[in-house]
Image: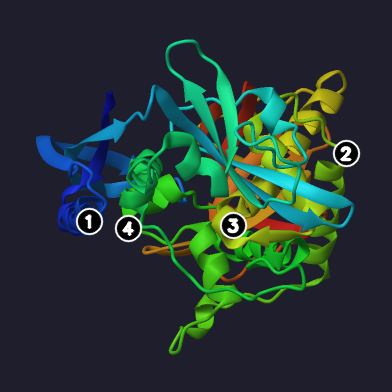
Amino acid sequence: MTEKTLETIDIPVYKRSYLENAIEKINRKAVKMGCEPLALSFDNPHEYRTSHHPFTGHKLVNPIVVEMVSAHLSYVIPRINGYELIAKLDIFKGDDGKVLLVCPVPGKTVPEKWINATSIQCDHCNKKRYRTHSVLLRNTENGEYKEVGSTCVKDFFGLDPKGFMFMASIIFDSIVGGIKDSDCLKNDNGAWGYNVDTILNITSAVIKKFGWTSRAVANEYNYQSTSDRVWNNLEPHIGMAKENFVTVDEEDKELSAKVIEYFKNLDHKGNEYLSNLIKLVKMGYVPSKYMGYACSMIITYEKAMNIERKKSEKDTRVSNYVGEVGKRLKNVKAEVIFKRHIESNYGTSTLYTFKDDEGNIMKTFYSGSNISLEKGNIIYLSGTVKKHNEYENEKQTMLNRISVKEV
């Protein structure tokens, strides 16, 4: 019995040849394993157009136009004896014992029993012995789940299921984004990976210098993602440009410590993504294939803290619009509450967020060299009101052509 899978994603036309080469490489392996080759097709040529810069938010004189095409990937995932693959389970050594990480098949849901598990079992042989890998299978007829140790899979099916395992693990988005196969340091626990605090320190420094760029945005605009920049700083290649390096400072280390403490005490509430983040923190290191999870920890933490901050301030001060669009504000006393450098193909700018004594939020993108502010600075702010808008139900005032004076 087989399961037909069709995945579709819109990609820039210039990535078409890259995707074709990636699928061709996978098909060579699929044929060797006796699997049906993947079928790749393209249609729906269209344009993606934006009048604002994707990273700075600046209004563009000439809109960005990207030629796009819809890519369709069709392939067959075999089912053996009525079973389908749900997830692969890996166990690692943590500071307080064994930690089980769950790597689900795209589109499949892992029951909470295995999300919360702390050991590898085998429902086939039922023998109690130390195992490091297993697979979670589901009977498509009665819905029954079975966990089978990696060494018992062949015996369970009565044949070698390597083709089945290979086809079920294909993730179209990862193929498009480019799967990063990179060597990394081997730690004392015997697994390939880096310490959590090392990754978080560098991630914090990267975000502070370049801003946060998700894999999806990086793919769409042919830009470097945050995780790629972290990898390049962990394992710099020969000839890497000096400006791509980051320096970890005490602020980065303090933030990393807060993030680690936050996830140590977080209740994942059955959320598979949060569950893996919690487990990585408790393990103390990150196996290389879970690097993407680790790089997202800081942005996940900051979003949670932002929500909590807004909840605590909601009953006291509510942001309202300041001034009139097109008119200039003069000498408004305000505090710098947020700062982030944003670099792109169009140059470097700095996003500043200010809050005045009444709790009103003002923002600006500054690309000059005359102003250098830090979070916590109290200043007199002048600027022209560019527009009024709302972000997450909060009224904000966008400024340009700002000037500041120290209080």
Q: Which mark is residue 222?
A: 4
Q: What is the spatial separation of the Cα atoms under label 3 and label 2, in whole angstroms?
A: 21 Å
Q: Residue furthest bottom?
A: 239
Earlier-in-chain disc, 4 versus 3 = 4
Tell me: 9 left or right of 364: left
Separation (CA) of disc 4 from disc 3: 21 Å
Amino acid at circle 4: Asn
Tell me which numbered mark, 2 or 4, is placed earlier along the sequence: 4
Q: Do tag 2 and tag 4 residues touch (Cβ < 8 Å)?
A: no
Amino acid under disc 2: Asn
Q: Amino acid at mark 3?
A: Met
Q: Which residue is mark 2?
A: 265
Secondary structure under the numbered disc 4 in the rendered image: loop
Residue 33 image point, x, y percent: 27, 51
Label drawn at residue 291: 3
Q: Secondary structure at mark 2?
A: loop
Q: Position of residue 397 (x, y in %)?
A: 60, 34
Distance between the alpha carbons at the discs numbered 2 and 4: 37 Å
Q: Which residue is mark 1?
A: 32
